[in-house]
Image (spheres, rainbow, N blue to C red):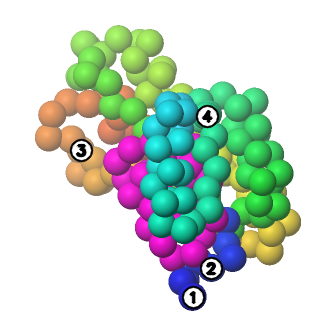
Amino acid sequence: MGRLENKVALITGAGNGMGRAAAILFASEGAKVVAADWDHASAIETVSVIESSGGEGLAVKVDVSNATQVEAMISATDDEFGALHVMYNNAGIFPSDDGGPTDTPEPTWDRVMEVNLKGVWLGCKYGIPLMLRSGGGSIVNVASFVALMGAATSQIAYTASKGGVLSMTR
C-alpha cells in the first residue's frame, strides 16, 4: 500500500515537466490523480501513463487564471472521485519576452501574474472547501528558488510571481 492510497490528488500543469512527474509519482503511491492542464492532449497523455501502470486518473482542461474553469476543475474532481486530499498548484509560465522592468511588455507581466500567482490563489480558493469536506489534506504551491535569490537572467514578471506564491503560501 502506497502513502497516498485512497487519496485524491489534483495537479495543475500536469501535462509535462514537474507536474507530469508529480502526477505519475503520486499515482505510483496509490493516489487517484486529476491531471489538469491548459493543453488537454498533454493531460490525457499523463493520464494514459498513469493508467498503463494500473492507476486511476482524470484529465481536465483548465486555464488556471479563469475562476469559472478552476471551479469546474474542482467540480469535475468531486464528481469523478468524491474527494480532494492533495492540491498541487504547479501550473506556471515563463514567456521569452519576460525581461527587465523596462523591456517586459505589460500584457506579458499581466499574463504571468494571472497564471503563476492568481492561478495558485484560485486553486486554493476553490480547492480548500472540497478538501475540508474530504477530511483535510495538503496543499503544495510550487514556487521557485528565484523567489529568494532572483533569476540569473532578468525575468521580472516570473520572479515577482513566484515571490508572491512564496509569500502567499507562508
Question: Is label 3 in a helix, a strand or a loop?
Answer: loop
Separation (CA) of disc 1 from disc 2: 6 Å
**What residue sits right under mark 4 in the picture?**
61
Separation (CA) of disc 3 from disc 2: 38 Å
Residue neighbourhood size for the residue with mark 2, other residues' Cα within 10 Å, grouped as few (<14), some (14–19), many (≥20): some
Q: Is residue 86 visible?
A: no
Q: For the N terminus, which image quadrant? A: bottom right
First along the sequence among labels 3 and 1: 1
Corner quadrant of residue 136: bottom right
**Looking at the image, do the residues carrying marks 1 and 2 touch, with CB atoms under 8 Å apart?**
yes
**For this view, does 89 lie left or right of residue 94?**
right
Separation (CA) of disc 4 from disc 1: 30 Å
Residue under the image location 70 percent in, 32 percent down: 69
Residue neighbourhood size for the residue with mark 1, other residues' Cα within 10 Å, grouped as few (<14), some (14–19), many (≥20): few
Residue under the image location 49 percent in, 60 percent down: 52
Going by the numbered disc 1, the residue's amino acid type is: Met
Separation (CA) of disc 3 from disc 1: 41 Å
Going by the numbered disc 2, the residue's amino acid type is: Glu
**What residue sits right under mark 2 in the picture?**
5
**Looking at the image, do the residues carrying marks 3 and 1 touch, with CB atoms under 8 Å apart?**
no
First along the sequence among labels 3 and 4: 4
Res 1 label: 1
Residue under the image location 43 percent in, 51 percent down: 19
Identify which residue, 40 or 102, lies in the foreground: 40
Question: Is label 1 in a helix, a strand or a loop?
Answer: loop
Q: Which residues are magenta?
A: 10-36
**What residue sits right under mark 3 in the picture?**
150
